[in-house]
Image (cartoon, rainbow, N blue to C red):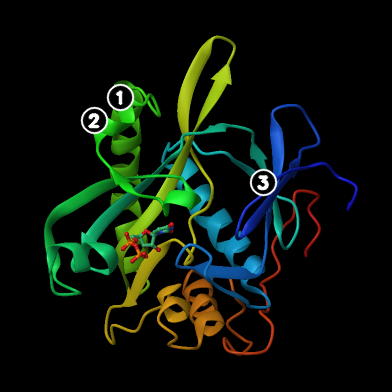
């Protein structure tokens, strides 16, 4: 396992060469980083939770026809994915004012936006992922106008679906970040959802208490980050209801692995 070729290591994930051409293995680490990796901590079990949460969300999005890189989960921390060329743009969708938007425009945190707003950030750690406009994206050829349209349409569909999914389990989807990739099939290229969707890249607030159930617990030193991720997993039906949601290590519900064996 350890001799697999490592293709890329990011802050929270590692990509390994996959078993077949055109595939990769996405490995979820326990590392949490914030403020462009100035803040860094390990949360034992976070990778396991994000692997399962992202699997569930990508699976459901696939079922409603959103093309994604997800093929199947391989084990507690890893999933098999389609190899794509990542578009170097982070697409953020916002429903409620929070984080950098609230700060930049002087909006009250928690105020509803007049409509869902999409923003683009250029993926460059050295520059701290600056916000960019469609003009920048096309002028510097980071993505073509048609690709921007496709990403926006997909991002809004993903938002509509996730707002409903989370509301159904008592969670408000405040905002989230997604990444897309280019996948070639013969001469055809299409834009598909890549990376992950987990509490690492979403703001999730409890509907009743407004408790934060996402990475802001780490960013803002609120404590209880792992417990919050476990709570999200529990409400999504991933964690075993019979075991305590808060504990030293996450307890995962048995589910069928591709081999049909319970994990
Ligand atoms: N986000 C992310 N990765 C980033 C920046 C933001 O996943 O590098 C997510 C973040 O979790 C939030 C949304 O994108 O759900 C909007 O983040 P914002 O621009 O408010 O930045 P932040 O305040 O998190 O720095």
* Comes first in the chain, label 1 or label 3: 3
Q: Residue drawn 75% across and 58% down? A: 75
Q: Quadrant of residue 183 in the image?
A: top right
Q: Nearer the viewer, mark 1 or mark 3?
A: 1
Q: Quadrant of residue 240 in the image?
A: bottom right
Secondary element under disc 2, as helix, strand or loop, is helix
Point out which mark residue 235 bears: none
Disc 1 to disc 3, C-alpha distance: 37 Å
The residue labelled by disc 1 is 139
Q: Residue drawn 40% across and 75% down? A: 216
Find out if the beta carbon at label 3 lies less than 8 Å from the nearest ligand 1 atom.
Answer: no
Disc 3 to disc 2, C-alpha distance: 36 Å
Single out the residue that lies furthest toward the left. 114
Camera-side residue: 127 or 177?
127
Point out which mark residue 135 bears: 2
Asked if residue 63 can be seen in this view, the reply is: no
Q: Nearer the viewer, mark 3 or mark 2?
A: 2
Please give left or right for residue 87 compared with residue 259 in the image.
left
The residue labelled by disc 3 is 72
Q: Do labels 1 and 2 touch, CB within 8 Å?
A: yes
| Image position, residue 244 (x, y; %) | 60, 90
């Amino acid at each position: 396992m350890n001799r697999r070729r490592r293709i890329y290591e990011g802050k929270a994930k590692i990509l390994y060469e996959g078993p077949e051409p055109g595939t990769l293995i996405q490995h979820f680490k326990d590392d949490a980083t914030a403020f462009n990796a100035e803040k860094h901590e390990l949360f034992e079990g976070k990778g396991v939770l994000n692997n399962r949460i992202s699997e569930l969300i990508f699976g459901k999005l696939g079922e409603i026809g959103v093309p994604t890189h997800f093929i199947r989960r391989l084990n507690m921390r890893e999933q098999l994915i389609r190899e794509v060329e990542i578009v170097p743009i982070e697409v953020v969708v916002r429903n409620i004012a929070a984080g950098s938007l609230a700060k930049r425009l002087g909006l009250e945190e928690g105020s509803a936006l007049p409509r869902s707003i999409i923003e683009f950030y250029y993926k460059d750690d050295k520059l701290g992922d600056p916000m960019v406009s469609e003009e920048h994206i096309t002028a510097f050829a980071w993505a073509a106008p048609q690709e921007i349209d496709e990403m926006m349409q997909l991002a809004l569909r993903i938002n509509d679906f996730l707002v409903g999914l989370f509301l159904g389990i008592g969670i408000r989807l405040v905002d989230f970040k997604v990444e897309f990739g280019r996948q070639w099939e013969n001469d055809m290229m299409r834009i598909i959802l890549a990376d992950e969707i987990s509490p690492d890249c979403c703001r999730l607030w409890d509907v009743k208490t407004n408790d934060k159930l996402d990475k802001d617990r780490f960013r803002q030193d609120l404590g209880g980050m792992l417990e919050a991720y476990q709570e999200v997993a529990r409400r999504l039906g991933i964690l075993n209801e019979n075991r305590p949601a808060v504990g030293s290590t996450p307890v995962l519900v048995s589910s069928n692995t591709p081999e049909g064996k319970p994990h």
